[in-house]
Image: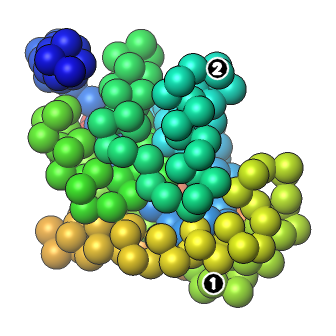
Amino acid sequence: MGSATEATKDISENLLGDKKVTVVFVLGGPGSGKGTQCANIVEHYGFTHLSAGDLLRAEIKSGSENGTMIQNMIKEGKIVPSEVTIKLLQTAILENGNDKFLIDGFPRNEENRAAFERVTGIVPEFVLFFDCYEEEMERRLLERNQGRVDDNIETIKKRFKVFVESSLPVVEHYESLGKVKRIDAAKPIPEVFEDIKVIFSSLDSKETA
């Protein structure tokens, strides 16, 4: 147990010591279109997209003991322990040459948020929140059905419930700090990206100022 803590400490020290990064948290319910828009932001604004879900799914695919534990939790619609996801995110940040990151689908709850800031020392530049009503997200997920274990109707309902109970308090926390940029994600994809461009163009001009 001690060595895992040591490893985490080392990673956070490296991260803070010689790598200054800009982080934007991307939050929104399942099916709100985060992934599509993250790809647009990467292409136009030079960010690296880190999806907590993709990192967890890659870990599952690896067949490790950690991966099996993650798979069982996702099947149950539960949230994976903070330290597991943070370790995957930190490793991805450290191994990447970029210094601008979109972290998609994380933090999933207040405990995630507090642990991430405590372990990495990183406070997000802002939170991009994809606001979308449940019926529209459900329609998109059922239409998409990419063969993911978490895309059947029962699990979708569980995921919505978890999102409302766990993730919305994170949005509210950052809202109280004036750090939330809210997007109407029910609009067509090109219109959503127009709204996003306004936000990221102002971030660009701030960086070059």
Between 119 and 39, the residue placed more toward the observer is: 119
Label 2: few (<14), some (14–19) or many (≥20) C-alpha neighbours in 10 Å:
few
Tell me which amino acid carries mark 2.
Ser
Q: Earlier in the sequence, mark 2 or mark 1?
A: 2
Left or right, residue 125 beside residue 35: left
Task: Residue 155 in the image: state x and y as whole percent.
Answer: 68, 67
Q: Say which mark, if any, is on residue 134.
A: 1
Tell me the mark number nearer the camera, choosing from 2 and 1. Answer: 2
Tag 2 residue: 62
SS class of the residue under badge 2? loop
Q: Is residue 104 above or below residue 144?
A: above
Which quadrant of the figure has residue 98? Answer: top left
Residue type at mark 1 is Glu
Left or right, residue 66 beside residue 82: right
Where residue 69 sits in the image (x, y, percent)? 52, 37
Which quadrant would residue 27 be assigned to in this image? Answer: bottom left
The label on residue 201 is none
* Residue located 16% across and 75% down the image: 176
**Can residue 200 be seen in this snapshot?**
no
Quadrant in which the C terminus appears: top left
Q: Is residue 129 above or below residue 95?
A: below
Looking at the image, which is closer to me, 48 or 145?
Answer: 145
> Who's the residue at 29% across and 74% down the image?
169
Image height of 24 relative to 189, above or below? above
SS state under label 1: helix
Residue 70 x/y as whole percent: 53, 40
Measure how far apart labels 2 and 1 are at the Cα level.
33 Å
Residue 6 seen anywhere in this rendered image of the structure: yes
